[in-house]
Image (cartoon, grey):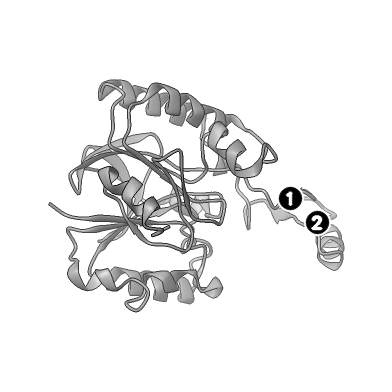
Amino acid sequence: MGRIFATGDTHCNACGEFSKLNAKNFPQQKELDKADFVLIAGDFGLLWCGSGEERHWLDWLEDKPFTTLFVDGNHENHAMLAEFLVEEWHGGKIHRIRPSIIHLTRGQVFEDIAGLRVFSMGGASSHDIQDGILDPDDPFFEEEYRKMRRRGAMFRVRGQSWWPEELPSEEEYTEAERNLDACGRKVDLIVTHCAPTSISDLLSGGMFKHDALTNYLETVKQSVAYDAWVFGHYHDDGIIQRKHVLLYNHVLEIRPDDLGQAEREGVI
């Protein structure tokens, strides 16, 4: 049986966030092979513009001894992701980015990933768009863009740095429910990018905005039996309510029975 490790947002190598997966910071990889998995809980970040740098780092990741799995976050080019063919893998739908780099699509239940049944539900709302989203088709786009940049505004550009598909569609929620019902609403591991509403409120003291996805994940939290839940998005590390694992800097082996021990030992 393989092993499964998880970490949070990697965003882009320009931010240095893939360094947590190098051999120095993640020495356990020396013991792994392609039957073992590293799971990135959203904001994968290497599918943005198809640049040579992105291809270089995808190849770097492909050359690692393990298989990389990821769910999407809000810092993804969702149009680019949608261009990949959908395959079935371990009973769920995926996009295969490289032979051993796999996007777990939304609302899927995967069987026997390192012995675990895994439910995936990517997506999240962007929190850095307080000043708006610009449309490149707007005749005043260039002028507005320059104004935004000059004043250091928090904004994105539709189809270039922001996509409405960052939140799931009704069809994806429906598929999620159908797949959860089909497995008796019992899984071992849930992986998302954002957290259920109640966990988000704990993290922020109620300051983070709720949305359709966090509210749906709250429904999942109340209606699905699970042993562990891994998520990213909030740029921190910690274990909340014993089995909800927020990851950013750490790479943690996911053994649901041992999460309490990891917390006690200060591993995260």
Residue 95 seen in the figure:
no
Q: Where is residue 208 in the image (x, y as percent from the top left)?
A: 66, 41
Front-most of residues 205 and 59? 205
Amino acid type indicated by mark 1: Asp
Front-most of residues 81 and 219? 219
- Residue occupying the point 64% across, 33% down: 210
Q: Which mark is residue 141?
A: 2
Amino acid type indicated by mark 2: Phe
Per the model, the C-alpha gap separating discs 1 and 2 is 7 Å
Q: Which residue lies furthest to the left in this view?
A: 1
Position of 158 with respect to 267 (left or right) is: right
- Residue occupying the point 24% across, 64% down: 66
- Residue occupying the point 28% across, 27% down: 186
The quarter in which the C terminus is drawn is bottom left
Position of 152 with respect to 248 (left or right) is: right
Position of 37 with respect to 250 (left or right) is: left
